[in-house]
Image: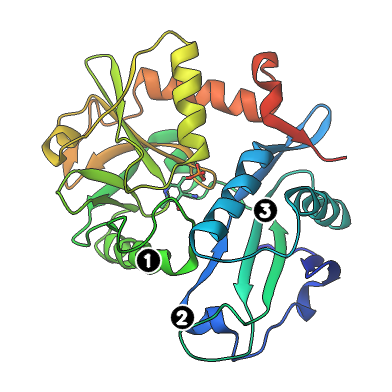
Amino acid sequence: MVKADYIWFNGELIKWEDAKVHILTHTLHYGLGVFEGIRCYKTEKGPAIFRNHEHIERLFNSAKIVYMKIPYSQEEIRQAIFETIKANKLTECYIRPIVFYGMGAMGLYPLKNEVNVAIIVWEWGAYLGEEGLQKGIRCKISSFTRHHVNISMTKAKVCGNYVNSQLAKIEALEEGYDEALMLDVDGTVSEGSGENVFIVRKGVIKTPPPLGILEGITRDSVITIARDLGLEVREEKITRDEVYIADELFLCGTAAEITPVREVDRRIIGAGEPGPITRKLQEVFFRVVRGMEPKYQHWLDYVE
Ligand code: PMP
């Protein structure tokens, strides 16, 4: 990774190298912590954070779902993000706020432990590779089932939830694929290891309903942009076999942006290259995040 100079840690900017925690950090042992992934893009009017408000709100909602209390207001976190970007003199970066329990009681009741908040920013290019963004990636339907909402709260971006994601990701990569596509307990399509999923079939865009998946902010942006383009979008269950016969398929997320999928389990999707609707959505999306679409200016939070 490309390191930056400063990290915001519990209210202060400290040197990247000094941002350390004790080995008894509770979250390190048991995974109860919440985090966000946000992107800041270079625009004509300076660096702009894409849908910052929604990301910070989701961070607080994640914390609420798992009984965590963040010792700052949403506005304080927003200002801290600005401060961190400015201190590191970055114009385009990925932003990782994380809230975690520190040292204290080591049992499974963490609520008396101190709550720590850190904000890390760094330069991060295309998550699934520049070539993947252009030509599409290859996915494998995971042998691991995605979370059930009564096992792990899926609307919360909880550190521990990502063990399941990592198992799927490792399996997919070890078998020569680029990313995993996960099914839920009912066997219908859920999401990628860190992305939401969309298919296009007979001109209609479909994505699984927000039940048992992370309510992606990119997912919401894609739905909005697609509908504004006059395209039909349906939030409905998708089966595994429907994925194989989709005309187009793509994954989306803050890190992955809009990444086309050209193959799943050795079945070629559509023509084996990004389809016209995926391309159009990608094109508009990248214009939106870079402040080139006046209609979506309200999604940009310019670094003050
Ligand atoms: N699903 C999962 C499991 C994720 O980790 C992410 C990334 N945060 C997403 C979907 C996409 O969410 P967003 O568009 O808000 O980044």
> In this figure, which colouring scheme has been used for the structure?
rainbow
Q: Secondary structure at mark 3?
A: strand
Q: Which residue: 77% across, 52% down?
A: 81
Is 160 situated left or right of 55 in this image? left
**Residue 50's spot in the image, x, y percent?**
66, 37
Toward the left, the furthest residue is 241
**Location of mark 1 (residue):** 166
Q: Which residue: 80% across, 53% down?
A: 76
State which tag comes first along the sequence, 3 or 1.
3
Q: Which residue: 28% across, 48% down?
A: 139
Q: Which amino acid lies under the numbered mark 3 shown in the image of this protein? A: Ile
**Residue 3's spot in the image, x, y percent?**
72, 65
Q: Secondary structure at mark 2?
A: helix
- Number of other residues with Cα within 10 Å of mark 1, as a class: few under 14, some 14 to 19, many 20 or more: some
**Location of mark 3 (residue):** 95
State which tag comes first along the sequence, 3 or 2.
2
**Distance in Å between CA atoms under marks 3 and 2:** 24 Å
Q: How many marks?
A: 3
**Residue 18's spot in the image, x, y percent?**
79, 80
Which mark is on residue 30? Answer: 2
